[in-house]
Amino acid sequence: MTAAAQAAPVVTLPAIGQPYGGGFFSGITRDPDTGKRYLNITAGAEHELIGAWGKYGEKIEGADSFTNGRANTEAMAAAGSELAQKALALRIGGYDDWAIPARDQQELQYRHFKPTTEANWQYGRSGDNPNSEPVGLLHTEDSPTQTTLEAFQVGGAEAFKPTWYWSSSQRSANDAFVMHFDGGGQYSFGKVIELRVRPVRSQLID
C-alpha cells in the first residue's frame, strides 16, 4: 500500500439526505487546485443564520474559493464579518468545522434539497458546477426537480426557505454570490444585505 493510500481516510459514501457527520449528506465537490474530493454535509434547518456578508467596498483576501467554504469563512471572520464568526462558532453533533458554503457547495444544496415545485430560473450560470461529482449543468425549467426527501420539501422540518441565501464566495469588493431557493437563481448581491445561511462542513474522501 502506498503512503498516499495509507493516509487517505476510509469513507463509505452515504445516500443524499442521509444523516451524516452532524447534518445531512449533500453531495461531493472536488478541489480544482489539489484534485481532492470532499463529502459535503449540510446542517439542519434549526442552525440557519441570518446576517450581512460583510462590509461594502472591502475586498477580502482568501474569500474567493468556489469549493472551500471553510477557508472563505475564516477569511471573512478575520476581516470582521459577524456572520462568518457566528458560523465558525457553531458546534453541531460534535463537529466544530462548520462554515458558510462556497458557491459550488451551495449549488449542491439546491440541486438535492430544492424545496418547491417552482420552475427553475434559467439565467446566467445558474446550476453550472464544474467542481461537483457529477458535474452540475445549467438549469432547465424542470431540472433539478423538487427533492423527494419529504423533510426538505416545503413545510418539512429541514426545508430551505424559498428565498435568498448567502454563499461565502466573494464576487468583488462590493458583492458576494447568492442563491435563491425557490427557482435556483445564482447571482451576486451587495455584502451589506442581510440574508440567510445554511451552514455546511466538508470531509475528505481522497
Image (cartoon, grey):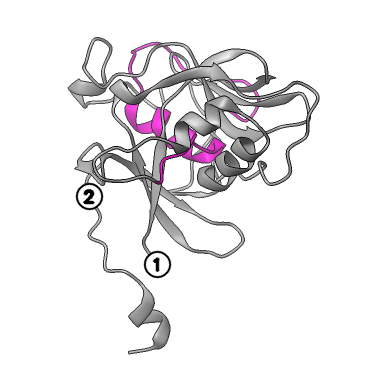
Quick one: label 2, few (<14), some, or many (20+) residues within 10 Å?
some
Q: Residue at x 54, y 56 (%)?
A: 31
Where does the image place residue 145, in percent across and percent down from the top left?
35, 23
Residue 36 lies in the magenta stretch: no
Asked whether the beta carbons under mark 2 and mark 1 sit within 8 Å of each other, the answer is no
Q: Which residue is mark 2?
A: 14
Could you tell me the amino acid type at mark 2? Pro
Q: Is residue 206 above or below residue 102?
A: below
Q: Residue at x 47, y 39 (%)?
A: 105
Q: Residue at x 33, y 38 (%)?
A: 91
> Which sits in the foreground, 169 or 72?
72
Task: Point out the residue furthest to the bottom here.
Answer: 1
Where does the image place residue 181, in percent across and percent down from the top left?
44, 18
* The disc label shown at residue 172, or none: none
- The Cα–Cα distance between marks 2 and 1, rounded to whole angstroms, is 15 Å
Where does the image place residue 156, in percent across and percent down from the top left?
21, 15
* The disc label shown at residue 206, or none: 1
The answer to whether residue 4 of the structure is visible from this angle is yes
Q: Quadrant of residue 178?
A: top right
Seen in the image, is 16 located left or right of residue 165? left
**SS for tag 2?**
loop
Quadrant into which the C terminus falls: bottom left
Stretch in magenta:
97-126
Residue 107 lies in the magenta stretch: yes
Q: Is residue 64 above or below residue 33?
A: above
Q: Is residue 116 above or below residue 94?
A: above
> Which sits in the foreground, 121 or 110?
110
